[in-house]
Image (spheres, rainbow, N blue to C red):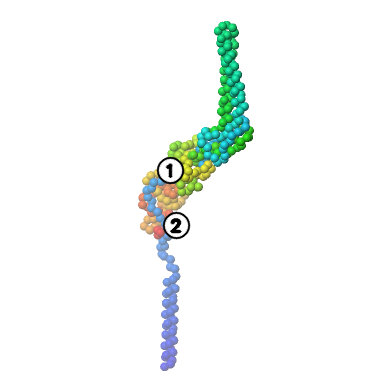
Amino acid sequence: MKRIITVLILAATLGLTAWTLLDNKEKVEAKVYKPEANPKVGVRTAVAELRDLSEETQFLGSFTANREVEIRPQAGGQIIQLPIEEGQSVGANRLLAKIDDEQLKYQVEALQVTLEGYQNDVRRYEALVKGDATPAVNLERAQLNIRATEAQIKQLKKQIANTTITAPFAGVVTQKMAEKGSVVSVGSPIAKITDISSVKLIIDVPEKAINQFRVGQPITVRTEVYPDVRFTGRISMIGVEGDAAHNYPVQITVSNSAAHPLKAGMYGSIANTNELKTRTLAIPRQALVGSAKQPQVYVVENGKAVLKPVEIGVTTNQYYEITKGLKTGDQVVTSGQINLQDGTMVRAQ
């Protein structure tokens, strides 16, 4: 009896062990990776659709002053007045400097005395000539002396006027090159006046884009110092001669403001939008595979990636125009092409 019980216990133990091993086998097999018979490659897609194609190009330049001039006197001598300082705003015709004109005034006074003597001579000679008491040539000589003296007086008065130096336009004194009491010669600089009531942004535009600009065209200007402010400028000059790299200068005039003052030397930029095509079939640039001479795209059809040749037209930074090979609504692959071949099963993500 004991032997029978022992055999039954042993059989039960073996059965339990066999059942445990079989159950573990099934669990392990369930965890083992089994490749799909027809695996699908995950890709990203976009739809070929009609678009207005335009291209935005950024141009960077720097601002220059509207006007700037070095003040150079037309008369020499000692500066007796110089009521300006660097950084000072001055109005048009404001006195900038006064040069000593005392000697010139003395010369004018002497010539006026001489002129008065010649005028007296003329009156005497006129009376004598009427009585045939003196030759008429004496009268003519006195009259010529009057004209010559008057011309000398005018010349000296012009020199006196040149000793008063005024601002040719309103601006800011950006340089002071002399001091009161110094002696200057004709043409030597004594100050520099800069007008920044408006500033000029100078940009270099390549040959292929220069025809997109025209004089008088309004354009938006951005700056680094005021990144959130948009300035309205107007093209005031387009260069007619390019440099060695075939770039042409374009000048954009921007009115200055007290709220956001611009200074000469600051950086500025513009974004010019060029309309290329309207309502044309286009796809993202990322969809294109192959070479520029033989462009191709993968089109998703019935769950498969079909490689199709296409012809492209104009291009922008984001899109290609498709002139042949696709139709509106086609689903093209934009990411994951490296894992594809013609006919590969795909799954759009």
Residue 21 pos. (x, y %): 44, 78
Q: Residue visible at 56% across and 38% down?
A: 84
Give the side of residue 179 with respect to residue 341, left or right. Answer: right
Residue 337 pos. (x, y %): 44, 56
What is the number of the mark on residue 274? 1
Say which of 334 and 104 sits in front.
Answer: 104
Q: Which sits earlier in the primary sequence, circle 1 or circle 2? A: 1
The quarter of the picture where residue 181 lies is top right
Q: Amino acid at mark 1?
A: Asn
Label 2 sits on a secondary structure element that is loop
Q: Is residue 240 above or below residue 347?
A: above
Q: Are discs 1 and 2 less than 8 Å apart at CB?
A: no
Q: Residue visible at 36% across and 52% down?
A: 329
Q: Residue furthest top?
A: 132
Looking at the rendered image, the quarter that the N terminus falls into is bottom left
Q: How many marks?
A: 2
Q: Can residue 34 be spotted in the picture? A: yes
CA gap, disc 1 and disc 2: 32 Å
Residue 272 pos. (x, y %): 45, 43
Say which of 152 and 316 sits in front.
Answer: 152
Q: Is residue 40 above or below residue 92?
A: below
Query: Residue under circle 2?
Result: 336
Looking at the rendered image, the quarter that the C terminus falls into is bottom left
Q: Residue visible at 55% across and 7% down?
A: 130
